[in-house]
């Protein structure tokens, strides 16, 4: 199973929209959105306070934490 971050999901949808959009004005906006997402700083990794696992915030929130 593939796990995508929200950023990867957004990039995929924008890239697909850029290949399908026909209106020139809309294409400019989609391409600008793609450029903007590439300029965003990376999402910082966080550590689970219980088990110490490190990862993206959404994945740490959803992981099956097993405290030792």
Image (tube, rainbow, N blue to C red):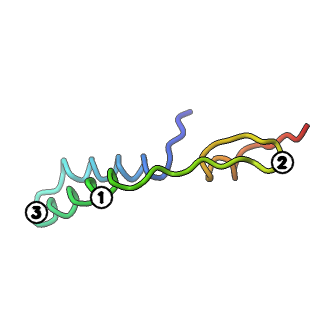
Which residue: 30% across, 58% down? 36
Q: Secondary structure at mark 1?
A: helix
What is the quadrant of residue 51 in the picture? Answer: top right
Of callouts 3 and 1, which one flags the residue occurring earlier in the amino acid sequence? 3
Of callouts 2 and 3, which one flags the residue occurring earlier in the amino acid sequence? 3
Badge 2 vs badge 1, beta-carbon distance below 8 Å:
no
Q: Nearer the viewer, residue 6 or 37?
A: 37
Of callouts 2 and 1, which one flags the residue occurring earlier in the amino acid sequence? 1
Nearer mark to the viewer, of 3 and 1: 1
Q: Where is residue 25 drawn, in percent x and y?
A: 11, 66
Which residue: 18% across, 47% down? 19
Badge 2 vs badge 3, beta-carbon distance below 8 Å:
no
Q: CA distance from mark 3 to mark 1?
A: 20 Å
Which residue: 14% across, 61% down? 28
Which residue: 20% across, 64% down? 29
Q: Is residue 20 above or below residue 2?
A: below
Residue density around tag 3, few if under 14, some if 14–19, many if 20 or more, within 10 Å: few
Residue density around tag 2, few if under 14, some if 14–19, many if 20 or more, within 10 Å: few
Nearer mark to the viewer, of 2 and 3: 2
Locate the N terminus by quadrant.
top right
Q: CA distance from mark 2 to mark 1?
A: 35 Å
Which label sits on residue 50? 2
Locate the C terminus by quadrant.
top right
Residue density around tag 1, few if under 14, some if 14–19, many if 20 or more, within 10 Å: few
User: How many numbered discs?
Assistant: 3
Q: Which residue is under mark 3?
A: 23
Which label sits on residue 21? none
Q: Secondary structure at mark 2?
A: loop
Q: Is residue 1 above or below residue 42?
A: above
Q: Which residue is under mark 1?
A: 36
Q: Secondary structure at mark 3?
A: loop
């Amino acid at each position: 199973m593939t796990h995508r971050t929200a950023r990867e999901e957004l990039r995929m949808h924008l890239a697909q929209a850029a290949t399908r959009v026909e209106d020139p004005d809309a294409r400019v906006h989609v391409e600008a959105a793609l450029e903007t997402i590439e300029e965003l700083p990376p999402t910082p990794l966080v550590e689970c306070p219980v088990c110490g696992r490190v990862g993206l915030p959404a994945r740490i929130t959803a992981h099956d934490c097993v405290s030792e």
